[in-house]
Image (tube, rainbow, N blue to C red):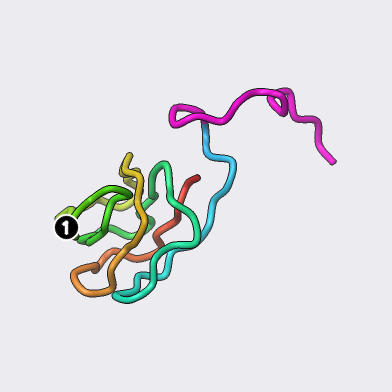
Amino acid sequence: MPKDNFQNSADSLISPAQICFPIAPSDSEELLQVTKAIYVGEGGDVTLRTIDGPGDVTFANVPTGAILDVRVRAVRATGTTATNIVGLA
């Protein structure tokens, strides 16, 4: 096991992600874990629902390699053209 100099530090919204996971956009399923941000591997539109958002919102023309600093509970298939999306939590 590698040494972790930060193992006794508290996790927060401004600390680096401790978990990264692929996101498969879905119109019916929410993520298993709310994100701190999402990484867009291949650019396009991203339609998502934030943790407290009353409805979906679309981020248009997100460039390849962008990180969206949003706490996301769902990424929708309808309206999302970006691919290789990774959740950062």
Residue range in magenta is 1-15
In the rendered image, residue 49, in percent from the top left (x then y), is placed at 26, 57
Amino acid tagged 1: Thr
Most common SS among magenta residues: loop
Question: Considering depth in this image, is 34 or 24 the residue closer to the camera?
Answer: 34
CA neighbours of label 1 inside 10 A, class few (<14), some (14 to 19), many (20+): some
* Residue 50 is inside the magenta segment: no
Q: Vertical placement of 89 versus 4: above or below?
A: below
Label 1 SS: strand
In the rendered image, residue 67, in percent from the top left (x then y), is placed at 35, 43
Q: Vertical placement of 29 versus 75: above or below?
A: below
Question: Considering depth in this image, is 20 or 82 the residue closer to the camera?
Answer: 20
In the rendered image, residue 85, in percent from the top left (x then y), is placed at 39, 59
Name the residue at 38% across, 56% down.
Answer: 41
Name the residue at 52% across, 33% down.
Answer: 16
Question: Considering depth in this image, is 52 or 74 the residue closer to the camera?
Answer: 52
Residue 75, quarter of the rendered image: bottom left
Q: Which residue is mark 1?
A: 58
Task: Specify the farthest residue to the right.
Answer: 1
Name the residue at 50% across, 45% down.
Answer: 89
Q: Is residue 15 left or right of residue 67?
A: right
Q: Is residue 29 left or right of residue 57?
A: right
Question: Considering depth in this image, is 15 or 63 the residue closer to the camera?
Answer: 15
In the rendered image, residue 25, in percent from the top left (x then y), is placed at 35, 70
Name the residue at 59% across, 41% down.
Answer: 18
Q: Is residue 33 left or right of residue 83?
A: right
Quadrant containing the N terminus in the rendered view: top right
